[in-house]
Image (spheres, rainbow, N blue to C red):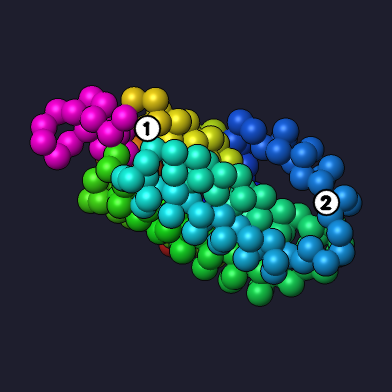
């Protein structure tokens, strides 16, 4: 998941308006000097991917027992720790590798969201088509962020005051709801439950945000580059 601590290849205007940003930054600043030297940025990035793998198996195995969903929640914690701290520790120790870090971090983000949503789609709670529709929306917004960084020198880290950490809390809340309500909660037909509708609506919002942000950015660029009379 793209995080506010992602490495960037050149100075950019970082637009970050998510609700938990300041509190999370204080926590990360507290953690950085307390990590042993053998904990490197690359190891933290790998640990974040490991967390996504844990989430995947937690969801995928939940058909046999809902208790596997606790594993998914633990995976979200692992994923946050690795993804949020890799860039922070590099800057704290002044060992940044901006181009390498930017490339690895955002390449990994795509794999992480695919693992999480594919696992959810393999669970008895959410249909695979709804999960993949949400994946598409997330990746489209990521593409917009990377393109805007190139053409506007702006790196947008949140939308609607919602960033990666808030998304993790939302997904943890959804997972707890799965455990409490069961796979048949809000069932509307043989194939569709309330969880399917929740994920599908989230997917519609993500895709709509991508379309809106694309139109807004295109308008800005048109005005910036329109020939002068």
Q: Which residues are magenta?
A: 182-199
Dot 2 lies on which element?
helix
* Residue 180 spot, x, y in % from top left: 39, 25
* Residue 112 spot, x, y in % from top left: 48, 58
Name the image quarter holding the C terminus: bottom left
- The relative height of residue 157 versus residue 140 in the rendered view (above or below) is above
Query: Quadrant of the rendered structure where residue 9 is?
Result: bottom right
Q: Nearer the viewer, mark 2 or mark 1?
A: 1
* Residue located at (44% from left, 44% from top): 68
Question: In the image shown, does 68 or 173 lie closer to the viewer?
Answer: 68
According to the image, label 2 marks what residue?
32
Going by the image, does 206 lie left or right of 8? Answer: left
Q: Residues within 10 Å of mark 1 (few under 14, many from 20)?
A: many
According to the image, label 1 marks what residue?
178
* Badge number at residue 105: none
**Residue 14 appears in the picture as rendered:** no
Magenta stretch, main secondary structure class? loop
* Residue located at (79% from left, 38% from top): 26
* Residue 82 spot, x, y in % from top left: 66, 55
The answer to if 144 sits in the magenta stretch is no
* Residue located at (26% from left, 37% from top): 196
Q: CA distance from mark 2 to mark 1?
A: 34 Å
**Residue 29 appears in the picture as rendered:** yes
Residue extending farthest to the front is: 64
* Residue located at (23% from left, 25% from top): 186
Query: Quadrant of the rendered structure where residue 193 is?
Result: top left
Question: In the image shown, does 78 or 9 lie closer to the viewer?
Answer: 78
* Residue 120 spot, x, y in % from top left: 36, 48
Query: Quadrant of the rendered structure where residue 28 is?
Result: top right
Question: In the image shown, does 155 or 62 lie closer to the viewer?
Answer: 62
Going by the image, does 165 lie left or right of 180? Answer: right
Residue extending farthest to the left is: 190
């Amino acid at each position: 998941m793209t995080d506010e601590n992602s490495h960037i290849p050149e100075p950019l205007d970082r637009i970050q308006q998510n609700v938990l940003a300041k509190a999370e930054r204080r926590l990360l600043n507290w953690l950085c000097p307390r990590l042993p030297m053998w904990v490197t940025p690359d190891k933290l990035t790998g640990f974040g991917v490991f967390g996504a793998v844990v989430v995947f198996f937690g969801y995928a195995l939940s058909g046999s027992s809902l208790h596997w969903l606790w594993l998914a929640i633990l995976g979200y914690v692992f994923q946050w720790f690795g993804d949020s701290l890799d860039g922070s520790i590099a800057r704290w120790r002044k060992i940044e590798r901006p181009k390498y870090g930017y490339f690895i971090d955002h390449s990994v983000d795509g794999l992480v969201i695919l693992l999480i949503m594919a696992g959810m789609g393999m669970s008895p709670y959410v249909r695979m088509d709804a999960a993949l529709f949400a994946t598409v929306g997330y990746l489209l917004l990521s593409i917009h962020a990377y393109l805007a960084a190139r053409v506007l020198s702006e790196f947008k880290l949140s939308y609607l005051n919602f960033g990666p950490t808030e998304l993790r809390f939302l997904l943890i809340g959804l997972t707890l709801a799965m455990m409490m309500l069961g796979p048949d909660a809000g069932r509307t037909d043989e194939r569709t439950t309330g969880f399917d509708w929740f994920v599908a609506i989230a997917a519609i919002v993500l895709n709509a945000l991508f379309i809106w942000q694309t139109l807004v950015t295109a308008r800005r660029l048109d005005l910036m580059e329109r020939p002068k009379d």
